[in-house]
Amino acid sequence: MKDISCYAITENIKEMCIESTHYLSDDMQQALNSAINDEKSALGKQVLNSLHENLEIARAEMIPICQDTGMAIIFVEIGQEVHIIDGNIEEAINEGVRKGYVEGFLRKSVVEDPIYRKNTNDNTPAIIHYSIVPGEQLKLTLAPKGFGSENMSKIFMLKPADGIEGVKRSIIETVDLAGPNACPPLVIGVGIGGNFEKCALMAKHALTREVGIHSEIPYVKDLEIELLEKINQLGIGPGGLGGTVTALALNIETYPTHIAGLPLAVNICCHVNRHVSRCL
Amino acid sequence: MMYKNIKAPISKEKIKSLKAGEYVYITGKIYTARDAAHQRMFEAINKGNNPPFELNNNIIYYMGPSPAREGNVIGSAGPTTSSRMDKYTPLLLDHGLKGMIGKGKRSKEVIDAIIRNNAVYFAAVGGAGALLSKAIIKSTMIAYDDLGTEAIRELEVENFPVIVVVDSDGNNLYETAIDEYRHFHY
């Protein structure tokens, strides 16, 4: 049994909010840098150079990479040997988000009711997904998600008869419809299987996978490679201004499903694909 | 790549000279407004009241900044998705608005109103909020303070970089440029 204090959780979440919104992970930076060489359009190259410069300024001057510092999405993996002390984990996480967004000069983008829309002024509540795993570690993954890209995401309840071709078509159509709205070059998270909520959760979680790492399932890896290539032939390009780099990565997660269904979720993320993990 | 420099507020002649695909630097005064501010301006105009700033010849920037650190004019300040403002934009254009800066596609109704009113739609680079903030030299909250990041701000900008997406003739870069690089059809 290992004791983990809520104070440590709060402090780590606060730091992770600030870190993720000012520094992009190495894999994302590398993907953006190689995109500059790959892009064929002059205007597209110019956009990518601006994004590169933007990352430099964000880091050097502590200005958020994007003004939409997102809604805080947190994946919590709790080892079953862990004992949380000094309070309530949910409150500890939200306190970390509150401190991160207020003390870190991040934008408060959360409204307390979807219809009446009054800003909560501290970016809480976060959206938290818990899973219980073996061991005595607590792993926190924070992925602040902006809504320019979130709004272009989709869920499809396909039929088994739609098969792999139906899956491919739906994913490509979703990216095509998102076009310039979602701030390309994109990272695309896909969930196939499970049910209505499971596929959405897998699509979101797929966005936290490092760019350049593929699924361990051979046919899924092939699908990731094929779809990325096709998406980059759509012509959308950086900023949606035309070009050959529309997406930097496409990550797929799968899960068993029902004999009657083929659920599919496509979660679109912009080039500011922020995620940071820590183990306590 | 060719660049053009323009002043804001923007003149009728200058708008006519801008063509889809051109890279433009804006210097002068522009105004921020996004979802909630648009809804309020729309309601004000429909009730016969004046919006909180002069629309004639002016440019709206669809942007809600992150808070400024001490010593900075503004925080991160990149464009938000324009299509959410489509419902309100034709009315603003019919009341004198001449330009919008945002990102992403516009509705047919907005493009028709752009042509009808000799206006222009620019895109700024989405997700480059830190870089774009460097072109903002002054920021003053002028209306709807209660909306926080969504309040209307008057911005003084110097060489603010944008791209003409829809020009006053209705040419649309998002359609033409993407076609040029499209090699996959399904």
Image (cartoon, coloured by chain):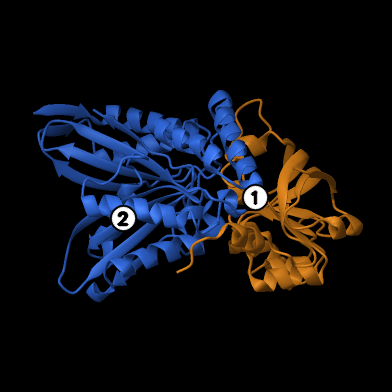
Chain colours: A blue, B orange
- Residue A163, can we see it? yes
**Residue at x-position 58% and y-position 25%:** A61
Label 2: element kind: helix
A148 left or right of A189?
A: right
- Can you tell which of label 1 and label 2 is closer to the viewer? 2
**Residue at x-position 29% and y-position 52%:** A222
Q: Quadrant of the C terminus of chain A?
A: top left
Q: Which residue is mark 2?
A: A223
Judging from the image, mark 2 belongs to the subunit labelled A
Q: Can you give x and y, in whole percent of width and height, for residue B179 in the image?
A: 60, 62
Amino acid residing under circle 1: Ala
> Quadrant of residue A62 in the image?
top right
Q: Can you give x and y, in whole percent of width and height, for residue A18 in the image?
A: 45, 31
Amino acid residing under circle 2: Leu
**Total marks in image:** 2
Q: Is residue A234 above or below residue A2?
A: below
Res. A94 mark? none
Judging from the image, mark 1 belongs to the subunit labelled B
**Residue at x-position 77% and y-position 38%:** B159
Real-space Cα separation, disc 1 to disc 2, in angstroms: 45 Å
A129 left or right of B97?
A: left
Q: Is residue A124 above or below residue A171?
A: above
Q: Is residue A117 above or below residue A213?
A: below
Q: Which residue is mark 1?
A: B151
